[in-house]
Image: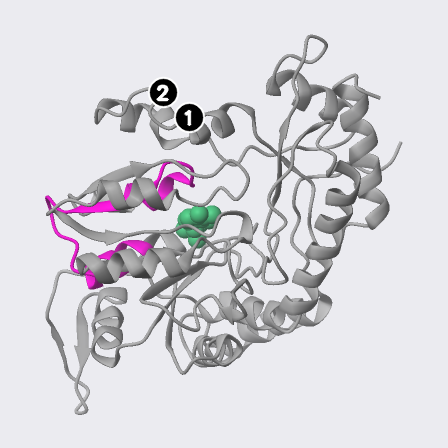
Amino acid sequence: MADYLPFTRPSIDEETIESVAEVLRSGWITTGPKVAEFEKRLADYLGGGRFLRSFLHATGALEEALVIAGVKPGDEVIVPAMTFAASANVVLRLGAKPVLVDVDLKTRALNMDQAAAAVTGKTRAIMPVHLNGLAADLDAVYALAKKHGLRVVEDAAQAIGTSYKGRKIGSFGDLVVFSFHANKNLTTIEGGAVSLADAEETRQLETLRFHGITKHSDGTMDVTRPASKHNMTDVAAAVGLGQLKHLDEFNKKRRDLAYRYLDLLGDEKLGVVPARGDQGHSWHMFTLLPRYNRACPDRKTLRERMHARGIGLGIHYQALNQFSLYRNMGYREGQFPNAERIGLETVTLPLFPAMALADVERVRAALAACLEMG
Ligand SMILES: *Cc1c(COP(=O)(O)O)cnc(C)c1O
């Protein structure tokens, strides 16, 4: 029996493990020189002369980016109905309203016609999500934002190393938020970052990241706002520095695996495959809408059968209006047909840098057998 194939697994090399041990032995383990180095190297990697500030996680970074964008209680923020719960939860945490719109079935990016129709006098920001590592239609997003004077907070949690029309996500744009959670294309175990263009907003972000503190040159400090605490540790940054060295190589491996999947599944006999995108797609995840049938009627059955064959399938994601929090806000079943279909049917196939091309064939064969479609 072959090894169990999970849908994802981080790749941490021995050099990175040794660098973590060095930080632990150094006597300085929280925010310090490694964090400063990680921020600098990441800003250099992205390019575009941007400010880059690290966070403990993308959830906190998204929330504070919305504060910088001026989102206040009663405001509205346009968010796709198909995303991880954090994207919309942070809007609610600020007392604002996430206004959901549907997504495209193959790209899973927010539908820009619906986004345009959702703008009201209360709309303050729009949050495109680069789901699965494929950039949303940013030309359309920024055109809509410009037309209505909206801020843009890009949820780029899944898009480190992704490009849009040849430009790296985070090298341009308004407020761009990355995640370095253990499953993401680059990990710091838990972590996040905001890329932004404005020096004064960067200074504000720093106070929002650390207790609302402004430090003075004489060693004293002032506290100017009741802020929270989101600073990354040097231990996490050491992991991130080790990862960053391999990011392009990891993403190339992901693309090779994804293209193999597309070669084997592209006829859509077994289900609806994702959009191919261009070379800028970082393939954070490869998702499939399988063709369920009488022999294999639903996702639960498929996941159990695949699990029995040693293959793990993820679920990314249920639609936001399928959760009680959003039902209780008045969102109903049937409002976002694509997001809801994805929510009920989608599976995430194994895809991570250490996986072999032969594993893709194993997954394809197991899917065909489990769906009883040869
Ligand atoms: C992972 C993820 C987040 C949250 O990131 P954390 O670093 O775990 O807080 C937010 N949005 C999307 C789309 C994500 O995939």
Residue ID for mark 2 = 334
Find the residue positioned furthest to the right: 1
Residue at figure coordinates x 83%, y 36% from the top left: 362
Residue 229 position, x and y percent, is 28, 61
Does any portion of residue 64 appear in the rendered image?
no
| Kind of residue indicated by mark 1 | Pro
Mark 2–mark 1 distance (CA, rounded to whole Å): 6 Å
Region rendered in magenta = 62-89
Color style of the picture: one colour
Dot label at residue 337:
1
Residue 149 position, x and y percent, is 18, 61
Residue 350 location, quadrant:
top right
Q: Nearer the viewer, residue 68 or 169?
A: 169
Residue at figure coordinates x 80%, y 28% from the top left: 366
User: Given contact means CB atoms under 8 Å apart, are the residues at marks 2 and 1 in contact?
Assistant: yes
Residue 5 position, x and y percent, is 75, 39
Q: Looking at the figure, which quarter contains the C terminus? A: top right
Q: Label 2's element?
A: loop
Indicate whether 329 appears above or below 155: above
